Image: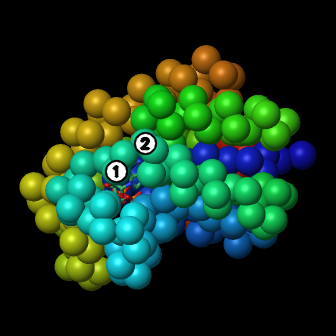
């Protein structure tokens, strides 16, 4: 049986959101994106949104406490009990450890971490193009480079964490959306 508790890991612009959308359509499980949830909180002007906005606009990470709180609340919803695709969480070792503790307690550990690997310069160009189309506040070149730096420093170490757990699968993220989707499916089989 294929995995249903899935984490997508990868640098900004690696295509996690795109692959998550294709996976959830195929598998009928929710897409849990802390980036989307935080952008919604900013748009709604909630307390969390107010705290997160400046940090996000600068390309830095929102505090572990806030993000762990919103992710765990989302994971406790009924629709997440049959599985989920996590995208953008965890992003730090502290978040990964908190998530592992929570899921272990529930007896529903992550089954697979799919790490989408890409060429940094190629994704910077992708994100600049997305900036023109979507106009996201954190898609300008300086912030994009900062997000890449933060990824290398804080999030890339999670590959070793999940490798040690025995659930890591690396997928080449360069190619068409369909090619990458095919590779993700194989990694989850
Ligand atoms: P990207 O497209 O760069 O991968 P996301 O949409 O996942 O970005 O997230 C956008 C921003 O939201 C991040 O740069 C960060 O400020 C904040 N954010 C999202 N998820 C997390 C997280 N797990 N921990 C800390 N900050 C987060």
Residue drawn 82% across the image and 40% down it = 106
Q: Is residue 153 visible?
A: yes
**Label tally:** 2
Front one among 92 and 8? 92
Label 1, secondary structure: give it: loop
The numbered disc on residue 64 is 2
- Residue 27 sits in which quadrant? bottom right
The yes-or-no answer for disc 1 within 8 Å of ligand 1 is yes
Q: Indicate left or right for 115 with 92 as reference.
A: right
Label 2, secondary structure: give it: helix
Q: Indicate left or right for 32 with 158 as reference.
A: right
The numbered disc on residue 41 is none
Mark 1 crowd level (few <14, some 14–19, many ≥20, 10 Å Cα):
some
Q: Indicate left or right for 139 with 84 as reference.
A: left
Where does the C terminus fall, quadrant-wise? top right
Residue 46, position in %: x, y? 40, 74
Residue drawn 14% across the image and 65% down it = 140
Residue 122, position in %: x, y? 25, 52
Q: Is residue 179 visible?
A: no
Mark 2 crowd level (few <14, some 14–19, many ≥20, 10 Å Cα):
some
Residue drawn 76% across the image and 32% down it = 104
The numbered disc on residue 62 is 1
The yes-or-no answer for disc 2 within 8 Å of ligand 1 is yes
**Splitting the image into four quadrants, where does ligand 1 fall?**
bottom left
Considering only vertical position in the picture, is 188 above or below 133?
above
Q: Indicate left or right for 74 with 3 as reference.
A: left
């Amino acid at each position: 049986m294929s995995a249903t508790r899935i984490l997508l890991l990868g640098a900004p612009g690696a295509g996690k959101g795109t692959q998550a959308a294709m996976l959830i359509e195929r598998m009928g499980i929710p897409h849990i994106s802390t980036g989307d949830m935080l952008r919604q909180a900013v748009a709604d002007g909630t307390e969390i949104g107010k705290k997160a906005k400046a940090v996000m606009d600068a390309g830095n990470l929102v505090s572990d406490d806030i993000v762990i709180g919103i992710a765990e609340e989302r994971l406790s919803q009924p629709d997440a009990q049959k599985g989920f695709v996590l995208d953008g969480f965890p992003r730090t070792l502290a978040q990964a450890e908190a998530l592992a503790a929570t899921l272990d307690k529930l007896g529903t550990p992550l089954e697979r971490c799919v790490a989408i690997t890409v060429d940094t310069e190629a994704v910077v160009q992708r994100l600049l193009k997305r900036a023109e189309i979507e106009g996201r506040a954190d898609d300008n070149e300086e912030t994009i480079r900062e997000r890449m730096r933060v990824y290398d420093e804080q999030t890339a170490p999670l590959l070793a964490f999940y490798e040690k757990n025995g659930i890591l699968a690396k997928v080449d993220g360069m190619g068409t959306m369909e090619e990458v989707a095919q590779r993700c499916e194989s990694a989850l089989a």
